[in-house]
Image (cartoon, rainbow, N blue to C red):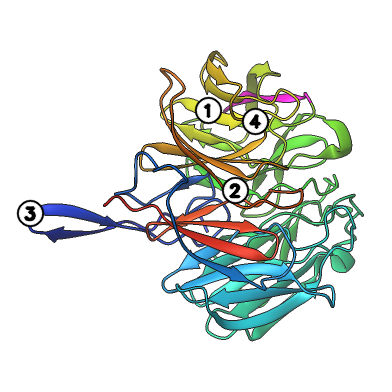
Amino acid sequence: MKKTTGFLLILLVGSVVAMGADSPQFRGPDRDGKFADTGLLKAWPEGGPALLWKSDGIGAGYASASVVGDTIYVPGMLDDNQGYVFALDLSGKLKWKSPYGTETLDKQAAGSRTTPTIDGDRLYVISGLGVLTCMSTADGKPIWQVDTKTKFGGQDVSWSIAESVLVDGDLVFCTPGGQDASVVALNKMTGDTVWTTKGFSEPHAYCAPDVFQFDGRRVLVTMTAKSVIGVDTKDGKVLWTHKHETDYDIHAVTPVLQGNMLYYTAGYGSGGGMLEVSKDGASVTPKWSDKNLDCQHHGVVLLDGYIYGAGHNNGKLFCIELATGTVKWSADEISQAVVEYADGMLYTYEGPKKGIMSLVKASPEKFEKTGTFVVAKGRDKHWAHPTIAGGRLYVRYDGSLYAYDIKAK
């Protein structure tokens, strides 16, 4: 679902008070790490913004929250190894929970790993073993379910399925990584198969796809085990591939686009680069590559011609010019961090062991941090991507969801 939900502006005593927008999918309204809220704090007090509440019991996992209207949707795995979507109200109280399939049993990282996608009155979520479920947002009742791994012959991958499925138009897309079915499109209403990527069979690589438009052609862009790929959403034709390899075939960062410049990156020292996409979206030309920003699974933000992201082996926060690959600045203070954006500021969440949230000015001129706090002291794996919606910062850590008030007073 590639759309942005606008802000609601209310005039009060001659001033403009900005209200937050929904966040119906992974990494915000357009799944690019940019959230639509305005009127937010530009600096945090010592100790960070006020904690409104902490909701426990949402199960093990690393999935982010989606927020639409007065409901928060977040998946987690309970002791029965089943994944459940937990629907919470805005005070953190449970409204309902609904199972969606067996999650991964990987002892290194057991738990949920995909963020729900909300489309109208339906929610779409995929389990670590590849079961894609469509359920009602009102009560969690299942509408349809497809075992994509079995149906499309998905290849086993080390850390299980870890994408957040994409809804665009009448279709829902996922990446089972099967023979002639690396990417598939299903009818979002019924779950019936619409197309598969015949002739392209690379395994799943933990990447959430996105869709971009070029001269009327809608192109799904994602990363598979060995490639960045572009797929015509009309018929599943693979328009182009660009080879990029990294250790363990982990390509978990969704590529980002500005104009016709597409940026991709991966961890383990492999780095990333910029591809120039043709006007019709049918081909790409490599323009530059760079190993400085080797982002593993934390996501990057592309804003006004500059890329902001944190390295993996090269554990710094970077600002890089998109057109040239020039490093504008780097900061040792922040490493291996999720990077997101709202209202002129970058929000960084450091893992895997730190759990440190920081607020940084989104500027190519220099690095300037204006606040920091620790989300939770606990075990390893601070991996979940935070969510910003309704003037709140939602951070998931293991079996708890934290809600912070980040509205300017």
Q: Is residue 355 magenta?
A: no
**Residue indicated by mark 4:** 335
Camera-side residue of 205 and 212: 205
User: Between disc 4 and disc 2, whose residue precedes?
Assistant: 2
Distance between mark 2 and mark 1 Cα atoms: 17 Å
Callout 2, which amino acid? Asp
Any part of residue 390 in sight: yes
Residue 161 location in percent, x, y? 80, 57
**Residue indicated by mark 1:** 307
Distance between mark 1 and mark 4 Cα atoms: 15 Å
Residue 295 location in percent, x, y? 68, 32
* Mark 1 vs mark 4: in front: 4
Element type where label 2 sits in the image: strand
**Residue indicated by mark 2:** 210
Element type where label 1 sits in the image: strand
Element type where label 4 sits in the image: loop
Distance between mark 1 and mark 3 Cα atoms: 36 Å
Give left or right: position of 128 versus 321.
Answer: right
**Residue indicated by mark 3:** 14
Element type where label 3 sits in the image: loop
Which range of residues does the magenta coloring cover? 269-278
Task: Work out which residue is located at the far front of the displayed protein and give it.
Answer: 46
Crowdedness near tag 3: few (<14), some (14–19) or many (≥20) residues, C-alpha within 10 Å = few
Any part of residue 280 in sight: no
* Mark 3 vs mark 2: in front: 3
Distance between mark 3 and mark 2 Cα atoms: 40 Å
Callout 4, which amino acid? Ser
